[in-house]
Image: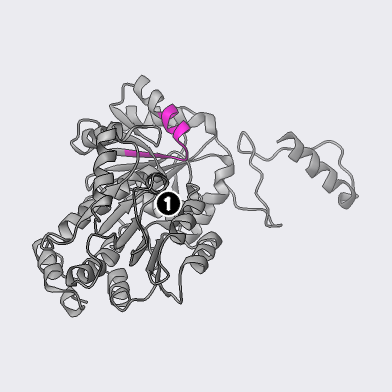
Amino acid sequence: MDFYELDLNDNTLDALDDMNFSVCTPIQEKCIPEILNGRDILGVAQTGTGKTAAYLLPILSMLDDGGFPKEAINCVIMSPTRELAQQIDQAMQGFSYYMPEVSSVAVYGGNDGHRYDQEYKGMKLGADVIIATPGRLISHIAMGNIDLSQVSFFVLDEADRMLDMGFHDDIINIAKLLPDTHQTIMFSATMPDKIEELANTLLHNPVTVKIAVSKPAEKIHQMAYVCHENQKIRILNYLFKSNQLKRVIIFACSKIKVREIYRELLQMKVNCGEMHSDLTQQQRDEVMYLFKSGQIDVLVATDIVARGIDIDDIATVINYDVPHEAEDYVHRIGRTARADRDGQAITLIRGWEIVDFIRIEKFLGYAVEKVDLPYKMVGPEYRPMNKRGGRAHFHRHGKPNDNKKGKTTNKRKNTRPQRRKKDKKQ
């Protein structure tokens, strides 16, 4: 569908023309008309499907048409991270280029006092749109800096990430300050039970829009090393020494692990940077500038921080840890092979992560290539869950434990004690 087929105003369409946007993505085609009709929305779509425009375009079009309170906050957009808030703010500036009467301010932590004063002034003057991280917005609310009593639009972007980060209570407390007449728009990459519960709490008779998670691009060469945790750094050493990797993102599950990997890479003389929530906003902005400009070759980051990274020339993605959800795996490796480029995705799978990776392969519909470990290392055996539906048992040398002693013809009698004994050793 073409944007001109939607009921967006002329200023919105002019901005889209300038940005060379003409055809809607599926999430935009389904959400924009419903938002324009005043319906609450629950959208399930992965990053990269165009969901930012799916809510910004109709909201800006309506604000620009008028009929909303002057010098009042009319829209609050919640973001899990500073990086995503900045990305939304940048999109906002482009889409509202021909709307001088529509104002906005981005509100997020990790800044100096000058930035805080700018946020305060913007909110007091009644910026139409507030783009905020939950913690920072709660801080302004506690200081009495913001009035949410006239908000017409409440947007939760990447709601699943906000819940993962522990912002559930903050979101509920913010929602309690909004008028009953506001319209709520919630987007999530996944649909776990906690998102359904939050939707039932915040949304009124919503329209649910689900966009199937797309499979990874065929141009991504996927491979995996099945290893033990203490072998992962040696594998990284091998990859950088033998392949001379450039333009790499390494994903890790926690900021502690990001710091550890970063220190190890520095010892290997790898030109790298780290991205995690312990850095100040100024430090994170500097790292992103260095990486985007090519002054550093490798970025080590957590999933949450990496949500704001949008770079087209990533050649390699390395999953230092296996993500728990197939959608997260697709999102991670989708950072490479963009703009008609080829790319590769390498995953390091330790023993107990095998179960998660088998689930990912089931979603993909094919097995990812398993590569022999370097330096004659021996990893765990790659095999699925056992017949009882529990986790498979993985042995240090990739071979089942032999139990040649104590054989008996009464197998039923001795099987369970033997299994318990083995489990206890592991």
Dividing the image into 4 quarters, which one contains the N terminus? Answer: bottom left
In the rendered structure, which amino acid carries the disc numbered 1?
Tyr
Q: Magenta residues?
A: 249-261
**Vertical placement of residue 365 versus 208, above or below:** above
Q: Is residue 381 visible?
A: no
Residue 10 horizontal/vertical position (percent): 11, 73
Residue 261 horizontal/vertical position (percent): 42, 29
**Vertical placement of residue 61 versus 378, above or below:** below
**Vertical placement of residue 338 versus 26, above or below:** above
The residue lying toward the viewer, choosing from 108 and 333, is 108
Residue 384 horizontal/vertical position (percent): 60, 52
Q: Image point 39% across, 44% down: which residue?
A: 143
Q: Image point 26% across, 63% down: which residue?
A: 56
Q: Image point 28% across, 73% down: which residue?
A: 32
According to the image, what is the colour scheme of the structure?
Answer: one colour
Badge 1 crowding class, 10 Å Cα cut-off, few under 14, some 14 to 19, many 20 or more, is: some
Dividing the image into 4 quarters, which one contains the C terminus? Answer: top right
Q: Which quarter of the picture shows residue 404?
A: top right
Q: Image point 24% across, 42% down: which residue?
A: 118
Q: Which quarter of the picture shows residue 327?
A: bottom left
Q: How many marks?
A: 1
Residue 304 horizontal/vertical position (percent): 40, 45
Q: Is residue 33 visible?
A: yes
The residue lying toward the viewer, choosing from 413 and 162, is 162
The residue to which callout 1 is attached is 329
In the picture, measured across the screen, residue 171 lies left or right of residue 87, that is right
**Vertical placement of residue 164 versus 24, above or below:** above
SS at mark 1?
Answer: helix
Residue 45 lies in magenta, yes or no? no
Residue 253 lies in magenta, yes or no? yes
